Every structure is written in C-alpha cells, then in structure tokens.
Amino acid sequence: MAQADLLLIHARLFTMEGPGVGYVADGAVAVQGSRIAAVGTSDALQREYAQAERMDCQGDIVLPGLIDAHMHTGIALLRGTAQDMDHWMQLGIWPFRRHVTDEMAVAGSLVNIIEAMQAGTTTFGDYNSNMAQLMPHYERLGARARVAEMIHSLPPQQGSVPPGELYPLDDTVGEALLQRNIALYEDWHDAGGGRFSVMFGPQGPDLLGGELLQDVFAEARRRQAMVHMHVAQGDREILQMELRHGQRSPAYLDAMGLLGPDLLAVHLTEATDQEVQLLAKRGAAMVYCPGSIGIIDGLVPPAAEFMQQGGRAALGSDQLPGNNCANMWNEMKLAALFNKIKYRDPKVLPAWKALRMATVEGAAAIGLGDQVGSLKPGKYADMIRVDAKAPTLNPILDTAPRNIVPNLVYSLRGHEVHWMMVHGAVVMAERQLLNVDAAAAVAAAQQWAEKMASKARQAGDLDASPLTKWTEQGLL
Amino acid sequence: MAQADLLLIHARLFTMEGPGVGYVADGAVAVQGSRIAAVGTSDALQREYAQAERMDCQGDIVLPGLIDAHMHTGIALLRGTAQDMDHWMQLGIWPFRRHVTDEMAVAGSLVNIIEAMQAGTTTFGDYNSNMAQLMPHYERLGARARVAEMIHSLPPQQGSVPPGELYPLDDTVGEALLQRNIALYEDWHDAGGGRFSVMFGPQGPDLLGGELLQDVFAEARRRQAMVHMHVAQGDREILQMELRHGQRSPAYLDAMGLLGPDLLAVHLTEATDQEVQLLAKRGAAMVYCPGSIGIIDGLVPPAAEFMQQGGRAALGSDQLPGNNCANMWNEMKLAALFNKIKYRDPKVLPAWKALRMATVEGAAAIGLGDQVGSLKPGKYADMIRVDAKAPTLNPILDTAPRNIVPNLVYSLRGHEVHWMMVHGAVVMAERQLLNVDAAAAVAAAQQWAEKMASKARQAGDLDASPLTKWTEQGLL
C-alpha cells in the first residue's frame, strides 16, 4: 500500500499532460510532502492509497495552479492610473514614481498577490526593484515565486521625461541593482525547499548601458540562471534604442550574443516577423501579456506567431496601473480573443491552447517545466479547485462535446477558484487565503496610496496625468 | 420633511448623469416606492429625509443597474458548445436545436439570468421564442425585462443546414411566432408596474420572408413598440440575403422603409461604413455584443463608428453557446479593448464611455432612457452596490486622478457586486439573490442539459460539432 498525505478524489481532472488538456473523468491526485505522488482515476487511487486522508472534490474541476509569468507587483498602488492614454509610462506612471517608497511598494504588492491567488495563480514571475523586501511575504503567503530584481539605470529622483526625449541613464544605479539581484539570488534561489527561484532582470535594452547589460548576462550565466527582460516592448523602447544605439532591440541583443535559451523575452510588442523568427530560432522564450499591452498600447504582440515558429510562450498579467487586474483567466481569454480578432478568424488560439499557455507551456517557458504546470507524479503539488456548481460554468457537458475548457477560459470570473494547494500545502480554502488577512492588506495599501497620491499632488507631479484633467471634467 | 422608503448614504456615487459619470463623493440616494426621489450628498439628503430608513454604504461604489440590451437566454443550456470554430450556428448550435424543448430552454434561461444578476445586470433585453413561459420567472426574480419574441421561419424539425446553402423558410412558422409576440405584448407590455415592456423581434432579415417582415413592423408600429432585430449580423446573413433577395440587409430594409428610430439593430458586424452611416442617419439604435462577436466571428463590429455618426449604442452579452458568459463588466472591458486594438490606439473608447454604454446610453438605445440607466429623481430605482474593499478595485484614489471607473471597467470580475435593487425592491443582498434558489436552478439546468445532449447524441446530431472531435482528441 503506497503512502500519501492527501488524496483528492472525485475531481474533473485536467492534468494538462499530453498534447491537449489530459482530462480524467472522476480523477484523483495523491500528494506526498510537496510533490504529486500519483494521478489517476478515483477508483484506482483509492485502492492504491487506501490509508491516505481524502478530500472529496464532489465533481469540482481540478487543474494545475496557474502561472503568471510576468508581473510588476511593486507598482500595484498605481492601479488604474495609466490607461486610455498615449505615453502611459511617462504620463501615467512616472508622475508617481519618485513618491513610491519600498514600504509602499510592498503594501501594493500584497494586494496584487492576494488578488491573483484568489483567481488561481500559484506561481508568480515577479519583477521589481525591491524583491528582498517582498520575498518574506511570498514565503509567508505560501505562493511559489520565480523572481528577478528589476535592473535599470534611471536616476532615482528623476520625475517624468517628455515622450520622444532620450532618458538620462546612470549605470551606477543599475550596477547597485545588479548587486541586489546577485544578493537576491544568493539568498533566495532554490530556497523554501524549491518553492523559490531567482532570475536576473535587466528592465530592457533601453534602460541600462550596454556594458552593464553584458555584465548582467555574465552574472546570470555564471549561475545558470535565466534572464527576465522586456524586449521590443513598445515604440518607446525602439525609439530609445535607435536614438542611443542606432539599432532595434533584437539586432542589438543578438550582436552581443544575448539571445538564447536563457532569455525570457517579455512582450515583443514591436517585434517584426523576422525578429520573432530570430528569437524563436535562438531558443528564447516569450511572455505575452494580452491585457496590459491591449490597454496601454492597443496592440496584440506576436505570441501566436512566436509559437508557430516553435517558441515557448507564457502569459502574464504585467502590472496594475494599466491592465488593471491580476487574473490569469482574464489573460487566457484575452489571449484567445485578441488573436481571433487580429486574424479575423475564430479558430485562432482556441481555449485549450490558452489554458496550456497558463499552465504547462507557461511553466516550460519560464524554466519550471520539470517542476510545475501539469499534474504529473514527481512534480510539485500546485493545484486549484474550481467550483463546478458555479452558474458561470453551467451546465456542464462531461462527454463529447465536452464544454468545460471553453467555459473555464471564456466565462470564469476568478472567484470560482475556492481552494488552492502550493508545494503540497493548502493555502486557500473556502475562498479564504489562510496565511494572510486580506482585508487588512487592502486597508494598509489604501493608506499608503493616499499618502503617495498626496505627496505627488503637492509636488505638482500629477498635473501631467490625463486622468487629472478627466477627473476635473467629470469623466472619472 | 420629505418622505422616502430608504436612504442610501455614504456611497461613492456614479449617477451617470451629465456628459460623464456624474460622480458624487459621499453620495446619497432616496428611494420612494419604485422610483428615485432624490440624489445628492449624504449631508444634504440626511437632512431632507431625516425619517427615512438608512442603508450605510460604507464607501461602496453605487451605480445604476446595468443594461444587457441583447440576450438569448433560451439557448443557455448550450453554453460553451460553439466557439473556436467556423460556422458556429450551423456546426455548434443547430445540432442541438431540435432537442431543446421550451421547458429545457427556461431552465437554461434561469442560470443565465442568475449569472447576469450576480454581476449587476438589472435590465434584460431577452429575445427568445418562448418568452411567455419565461416572463413569470422574470416577475418572480425581480429583474427588469424588455423582451421580444424571436420571430423566424425556420421549420421546427430542421437539423443543421450546410454552410453556404440557402435555409428553407416556412412563413407559417414565423406567422405563428408573430402571433405569440402580439400575445406577449398584450400580456406583458407595461406590466409589473412598468417593470416589463415588450418589443417585436424578427430574428433577422434573412430568417423570414419579406411580407411577413413587413407585417411584423406594421404590428409593432401600430403599438408604438420598438423592433429588436439582428441586422448584418455576419457573413452568413449577408450571403443568405444576396442569394434570396439580391441585396445586402441594410439596403433591403431601407427599401421597405424599415430603418427608423423604432429599430434596435443588433450586431451590424458586416455593415460597411456607408451602411453604418445610413442606419445612424435613419435614427436606428444599435446593440454591440463584443464578447460574442469576438468569439464567434473574430470581428469587432462598428459600434465606435456608429456612435461617431451620432447613433445610440447599447451593449449586450448575446448568448452562452459562444460568448460564453453573461457579465456586463466583461462586455464593457471587451468593448473598450477590442476597439483600442482595432484602431491600434489606447485612447479609443475609454473606460467612462464603456460604462455609459452599459448604463445611461444603453438605456436610451433600447428606449428606456426616461426610466432607467442613471440615478436621477423620477427614474426607477435600479441600483447596484460594488464592494469598495475588494482587492480587485484597490487601492482607490478618490481625488484626481480618480481611478475608480478604469478599475470598474478593466478589473472588476463581477462578484464584487453584492447588493442590487430593481424597481425599488431589494433583489440581492450579501451576494445572495433573494427570490430564487440559485443552486437548485443550476442543478435543474444540469439535468436538462444531460437529457438534451443524450438525445442529440443518440440522433447522431453531435457528430457534426468540431468539439466532438476535439473531445475525442483530448483537447477538451
């Protein structure tokens, strides 16, 4: 008789193994320690693990925990301040920038993380400039985090830079952030029994000098760590690259030998077909952030094309100033719909492919393919339960034509996720996160946000935001 | 001292009056009977209505109830069976069509209506071929309904029709449905103290004969009722029109004198710029269903263009086989994002405009502009409360730049709506609908769906659905 700590039974199980979604009717998962011991039918596993404690899923849908491959939770306090405008970074975000302390940033991150967990995210690809302060919170919350320090050379007291002008860069700033990334790696890589891992995070080829960028990659490669970086993330970046280096980002990076399987390239919004081919050929992976890029740019990055070229692509919620939410169901839905619209073809990026991007393929793209993303013996036990009795998913057709995956991707709101396990530990039950007081986190973030806004307002920095004008006009 | 049954106080109030969103900080609404008696600040209304029972909204966001202008709740049992494919109607929906009884349809409608109410919809533009059976449920649930009988001439035992072939039409079928629409009008128009109203509902210019279509309009005009009809809803319709009548739908309708202010034209997916101009010029109103048309066609109908021409446009969730949800926050978000993507411009269709489409402008488009859609003395008291402490909306910046509307439109999932009043009566409190057992409705629909699918499967009708193949391939 095999041993397990917990046996989930009577689930509608989507293992995400194989070429599709790996459905198991009346499925079961055995968990032992932090890992999945077995996956099969309830009948088979109840016989094999007769002694294990059981959780009857009562027909609920059980899936691997969702992977949010790219987030900047550190600017969550600015939720909803940078959309419906041009130059969102310069006009929306940067007016607040010098008024956000690390303490404020952490308070915002907590709301962002809570929101995401409540919709099923178990793995966080977080990428800020204060990760050391944030990591203890990930540890406490029980989520999985694969993080990077965001390394840029923007002078700290710099306010807004007018669109079209070259940013001032000071690589002593970036060098200090690289040292922080190294320290983050030393402290947290492979920590928490494997729940945490660290990448290196240059913010983008336009936001630090070339030598420093080489140094960052060298430090990453010395440790066999991946590099998490925005690449061709918008016309803003391309303009900066052309002004400063006379080259577009992909050519610039390729000339330096920085396009390879250790690169997680985020957005690629402005990448041409040739550039997409180049990145896929070099073995780089991609993160597609549909909601964020849809809102802030009105664009659909070439994720479908990248996958067509054999590239691995994950999904990300990016950031709250202009997304404005952290909900992987939203990202799956928008990935599918935006690509249908881009190609005027309802067959493009079907629901099951979107679900794979948020699970098994997302895990592979961020270098965790052997650890999470599917329900497979030996992988870590990261799982969510979705209420199969939620009106948004009903009725359910279990046999062909099975409608569960389309309704997960196109109808789920997020709150139907009511239970979550990460690394073998239950972190959410009956919709409540067990390791954090969510209401207190919201209240704390609110206080910090008011302080931040008050300071920025007093400094006159908010006059530049179009939202200030719209508020005065009664439009907000 | 003025009289009121209930005084809502301490709300972040969006009245939707004026050109924008009509924000009132620390706002209050006085309700008397079925109508709004007064709107103002908490201070002012507490003095004026000192005796009224009070509800302290504790800073929650209070808005007019949302208007879902176009729904076919009668096919809700088919949720998730018609997407990611070409010819969704022929290959996705019609295989089930002859196996759905009126009783089954009503059971599906209930889940659809419950789901929509749980996200804040108070007014239902429902449009099916069994409205007489459904209306008592709207009466019981407490929602507002502005309905039409869906009049078409498709023979009842007709299964699927191969794409590209002319449908068989039998106007004796349509004539009987017109009589049903007349009876519906007699029984329900202006019933429920004004909570219900009836339009006439030819399904589309391609789905009934020309003379019958004229008769439908004549019956509507005799009663000063509006006509709710799909127009240019897809290439399928245009093909049928060209094959049968040698004309595209707008020209055909205009030649018959049927384009006017009494027409609520749904979709206009295939309408050219000239056709959009023509409809706007004739004073017709439009319903835009972003999610549904995005999923089933991969297209963005010309709603922004129609509004640019001065036309009034509402939003609709359409139907569940291929949307796959009934959630007006989803429709607002998709309306904004799809149009940004269509024009590659993040400034197109900002959040406040999307919110107006789902409230005050939607109400005007469907002919209820003097009754609902904004919080204004004399209008019916249809309101929702949104939990201002939900992580998805936080932090909140109350002063400029105010971020509430962008976060409602771009981040709200739906379940943050926790209280609803329709026609002066509370129909939802603490997220529970008060007049229906939601769990029992879901269970009943599930039973009917299984019967429906079983019959359709036995008849071999489901072999045509691409989802059947994908299920067998492990993709669903």
Image: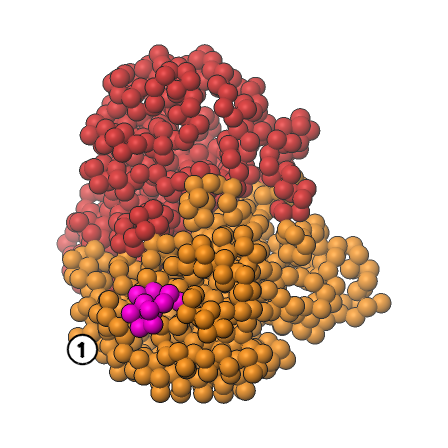
Chain colours: A red, B orange
Judge whether residue A92 is colored magenta.
no
Q: Is residue A396 visible?
A: no
Residue in view at x 48 percent, y 55 percent: B303
Q: Please, is residue B208 above or below residue A322 in the view?
A: below
Q: What x and y, as percent, mark residue B68?
A: 50, 65
Q: Is residue B460 visible?
A: yes
Question: Disc 1 marks which amino acid?
Answer: Gln
Q: Quadrant of residue B475?
A: bottom left
Closest to the observer, A292 or A218: A292
Instruction: State the quadrant of the C terminus of chain B.
Output: bottom left
Asked whether, in this view, residue A373 is left or right of residue A296, the answer is left
Which of the chains bears the disc numbered 1?
B
Closest to the observer, B257 or B17: B257
Residue in view at x 26 percent, y 59 percent: B85
Residue in view at x 32 percent, y 31 percent: A271
Q: What x and y, as percent, mark residue A229?
A: 35, 27
The total of numbered circles placed on residues is 1
Q: What x and y, as percent, mark residue B117?
A: 50, 66
SS of the residue at dot 1? helix
Asked whether, in this view, residue A96 is left or right of residue B333, the answer is right
Q: Residue furthest right?
A: B1
Q: Please, is residue A88 above or below residue B259 in the view?
A: above
Report the residue marked by disc 1.
Answer: B458
Residue in view at x 67 percent, y 26 percent: A459
In this picture, which residue range is highlighted in magenta? B237-249
Closest to the observer, A130 or A392: A392
Q: Quadrant of residue A404?
A: bottom left
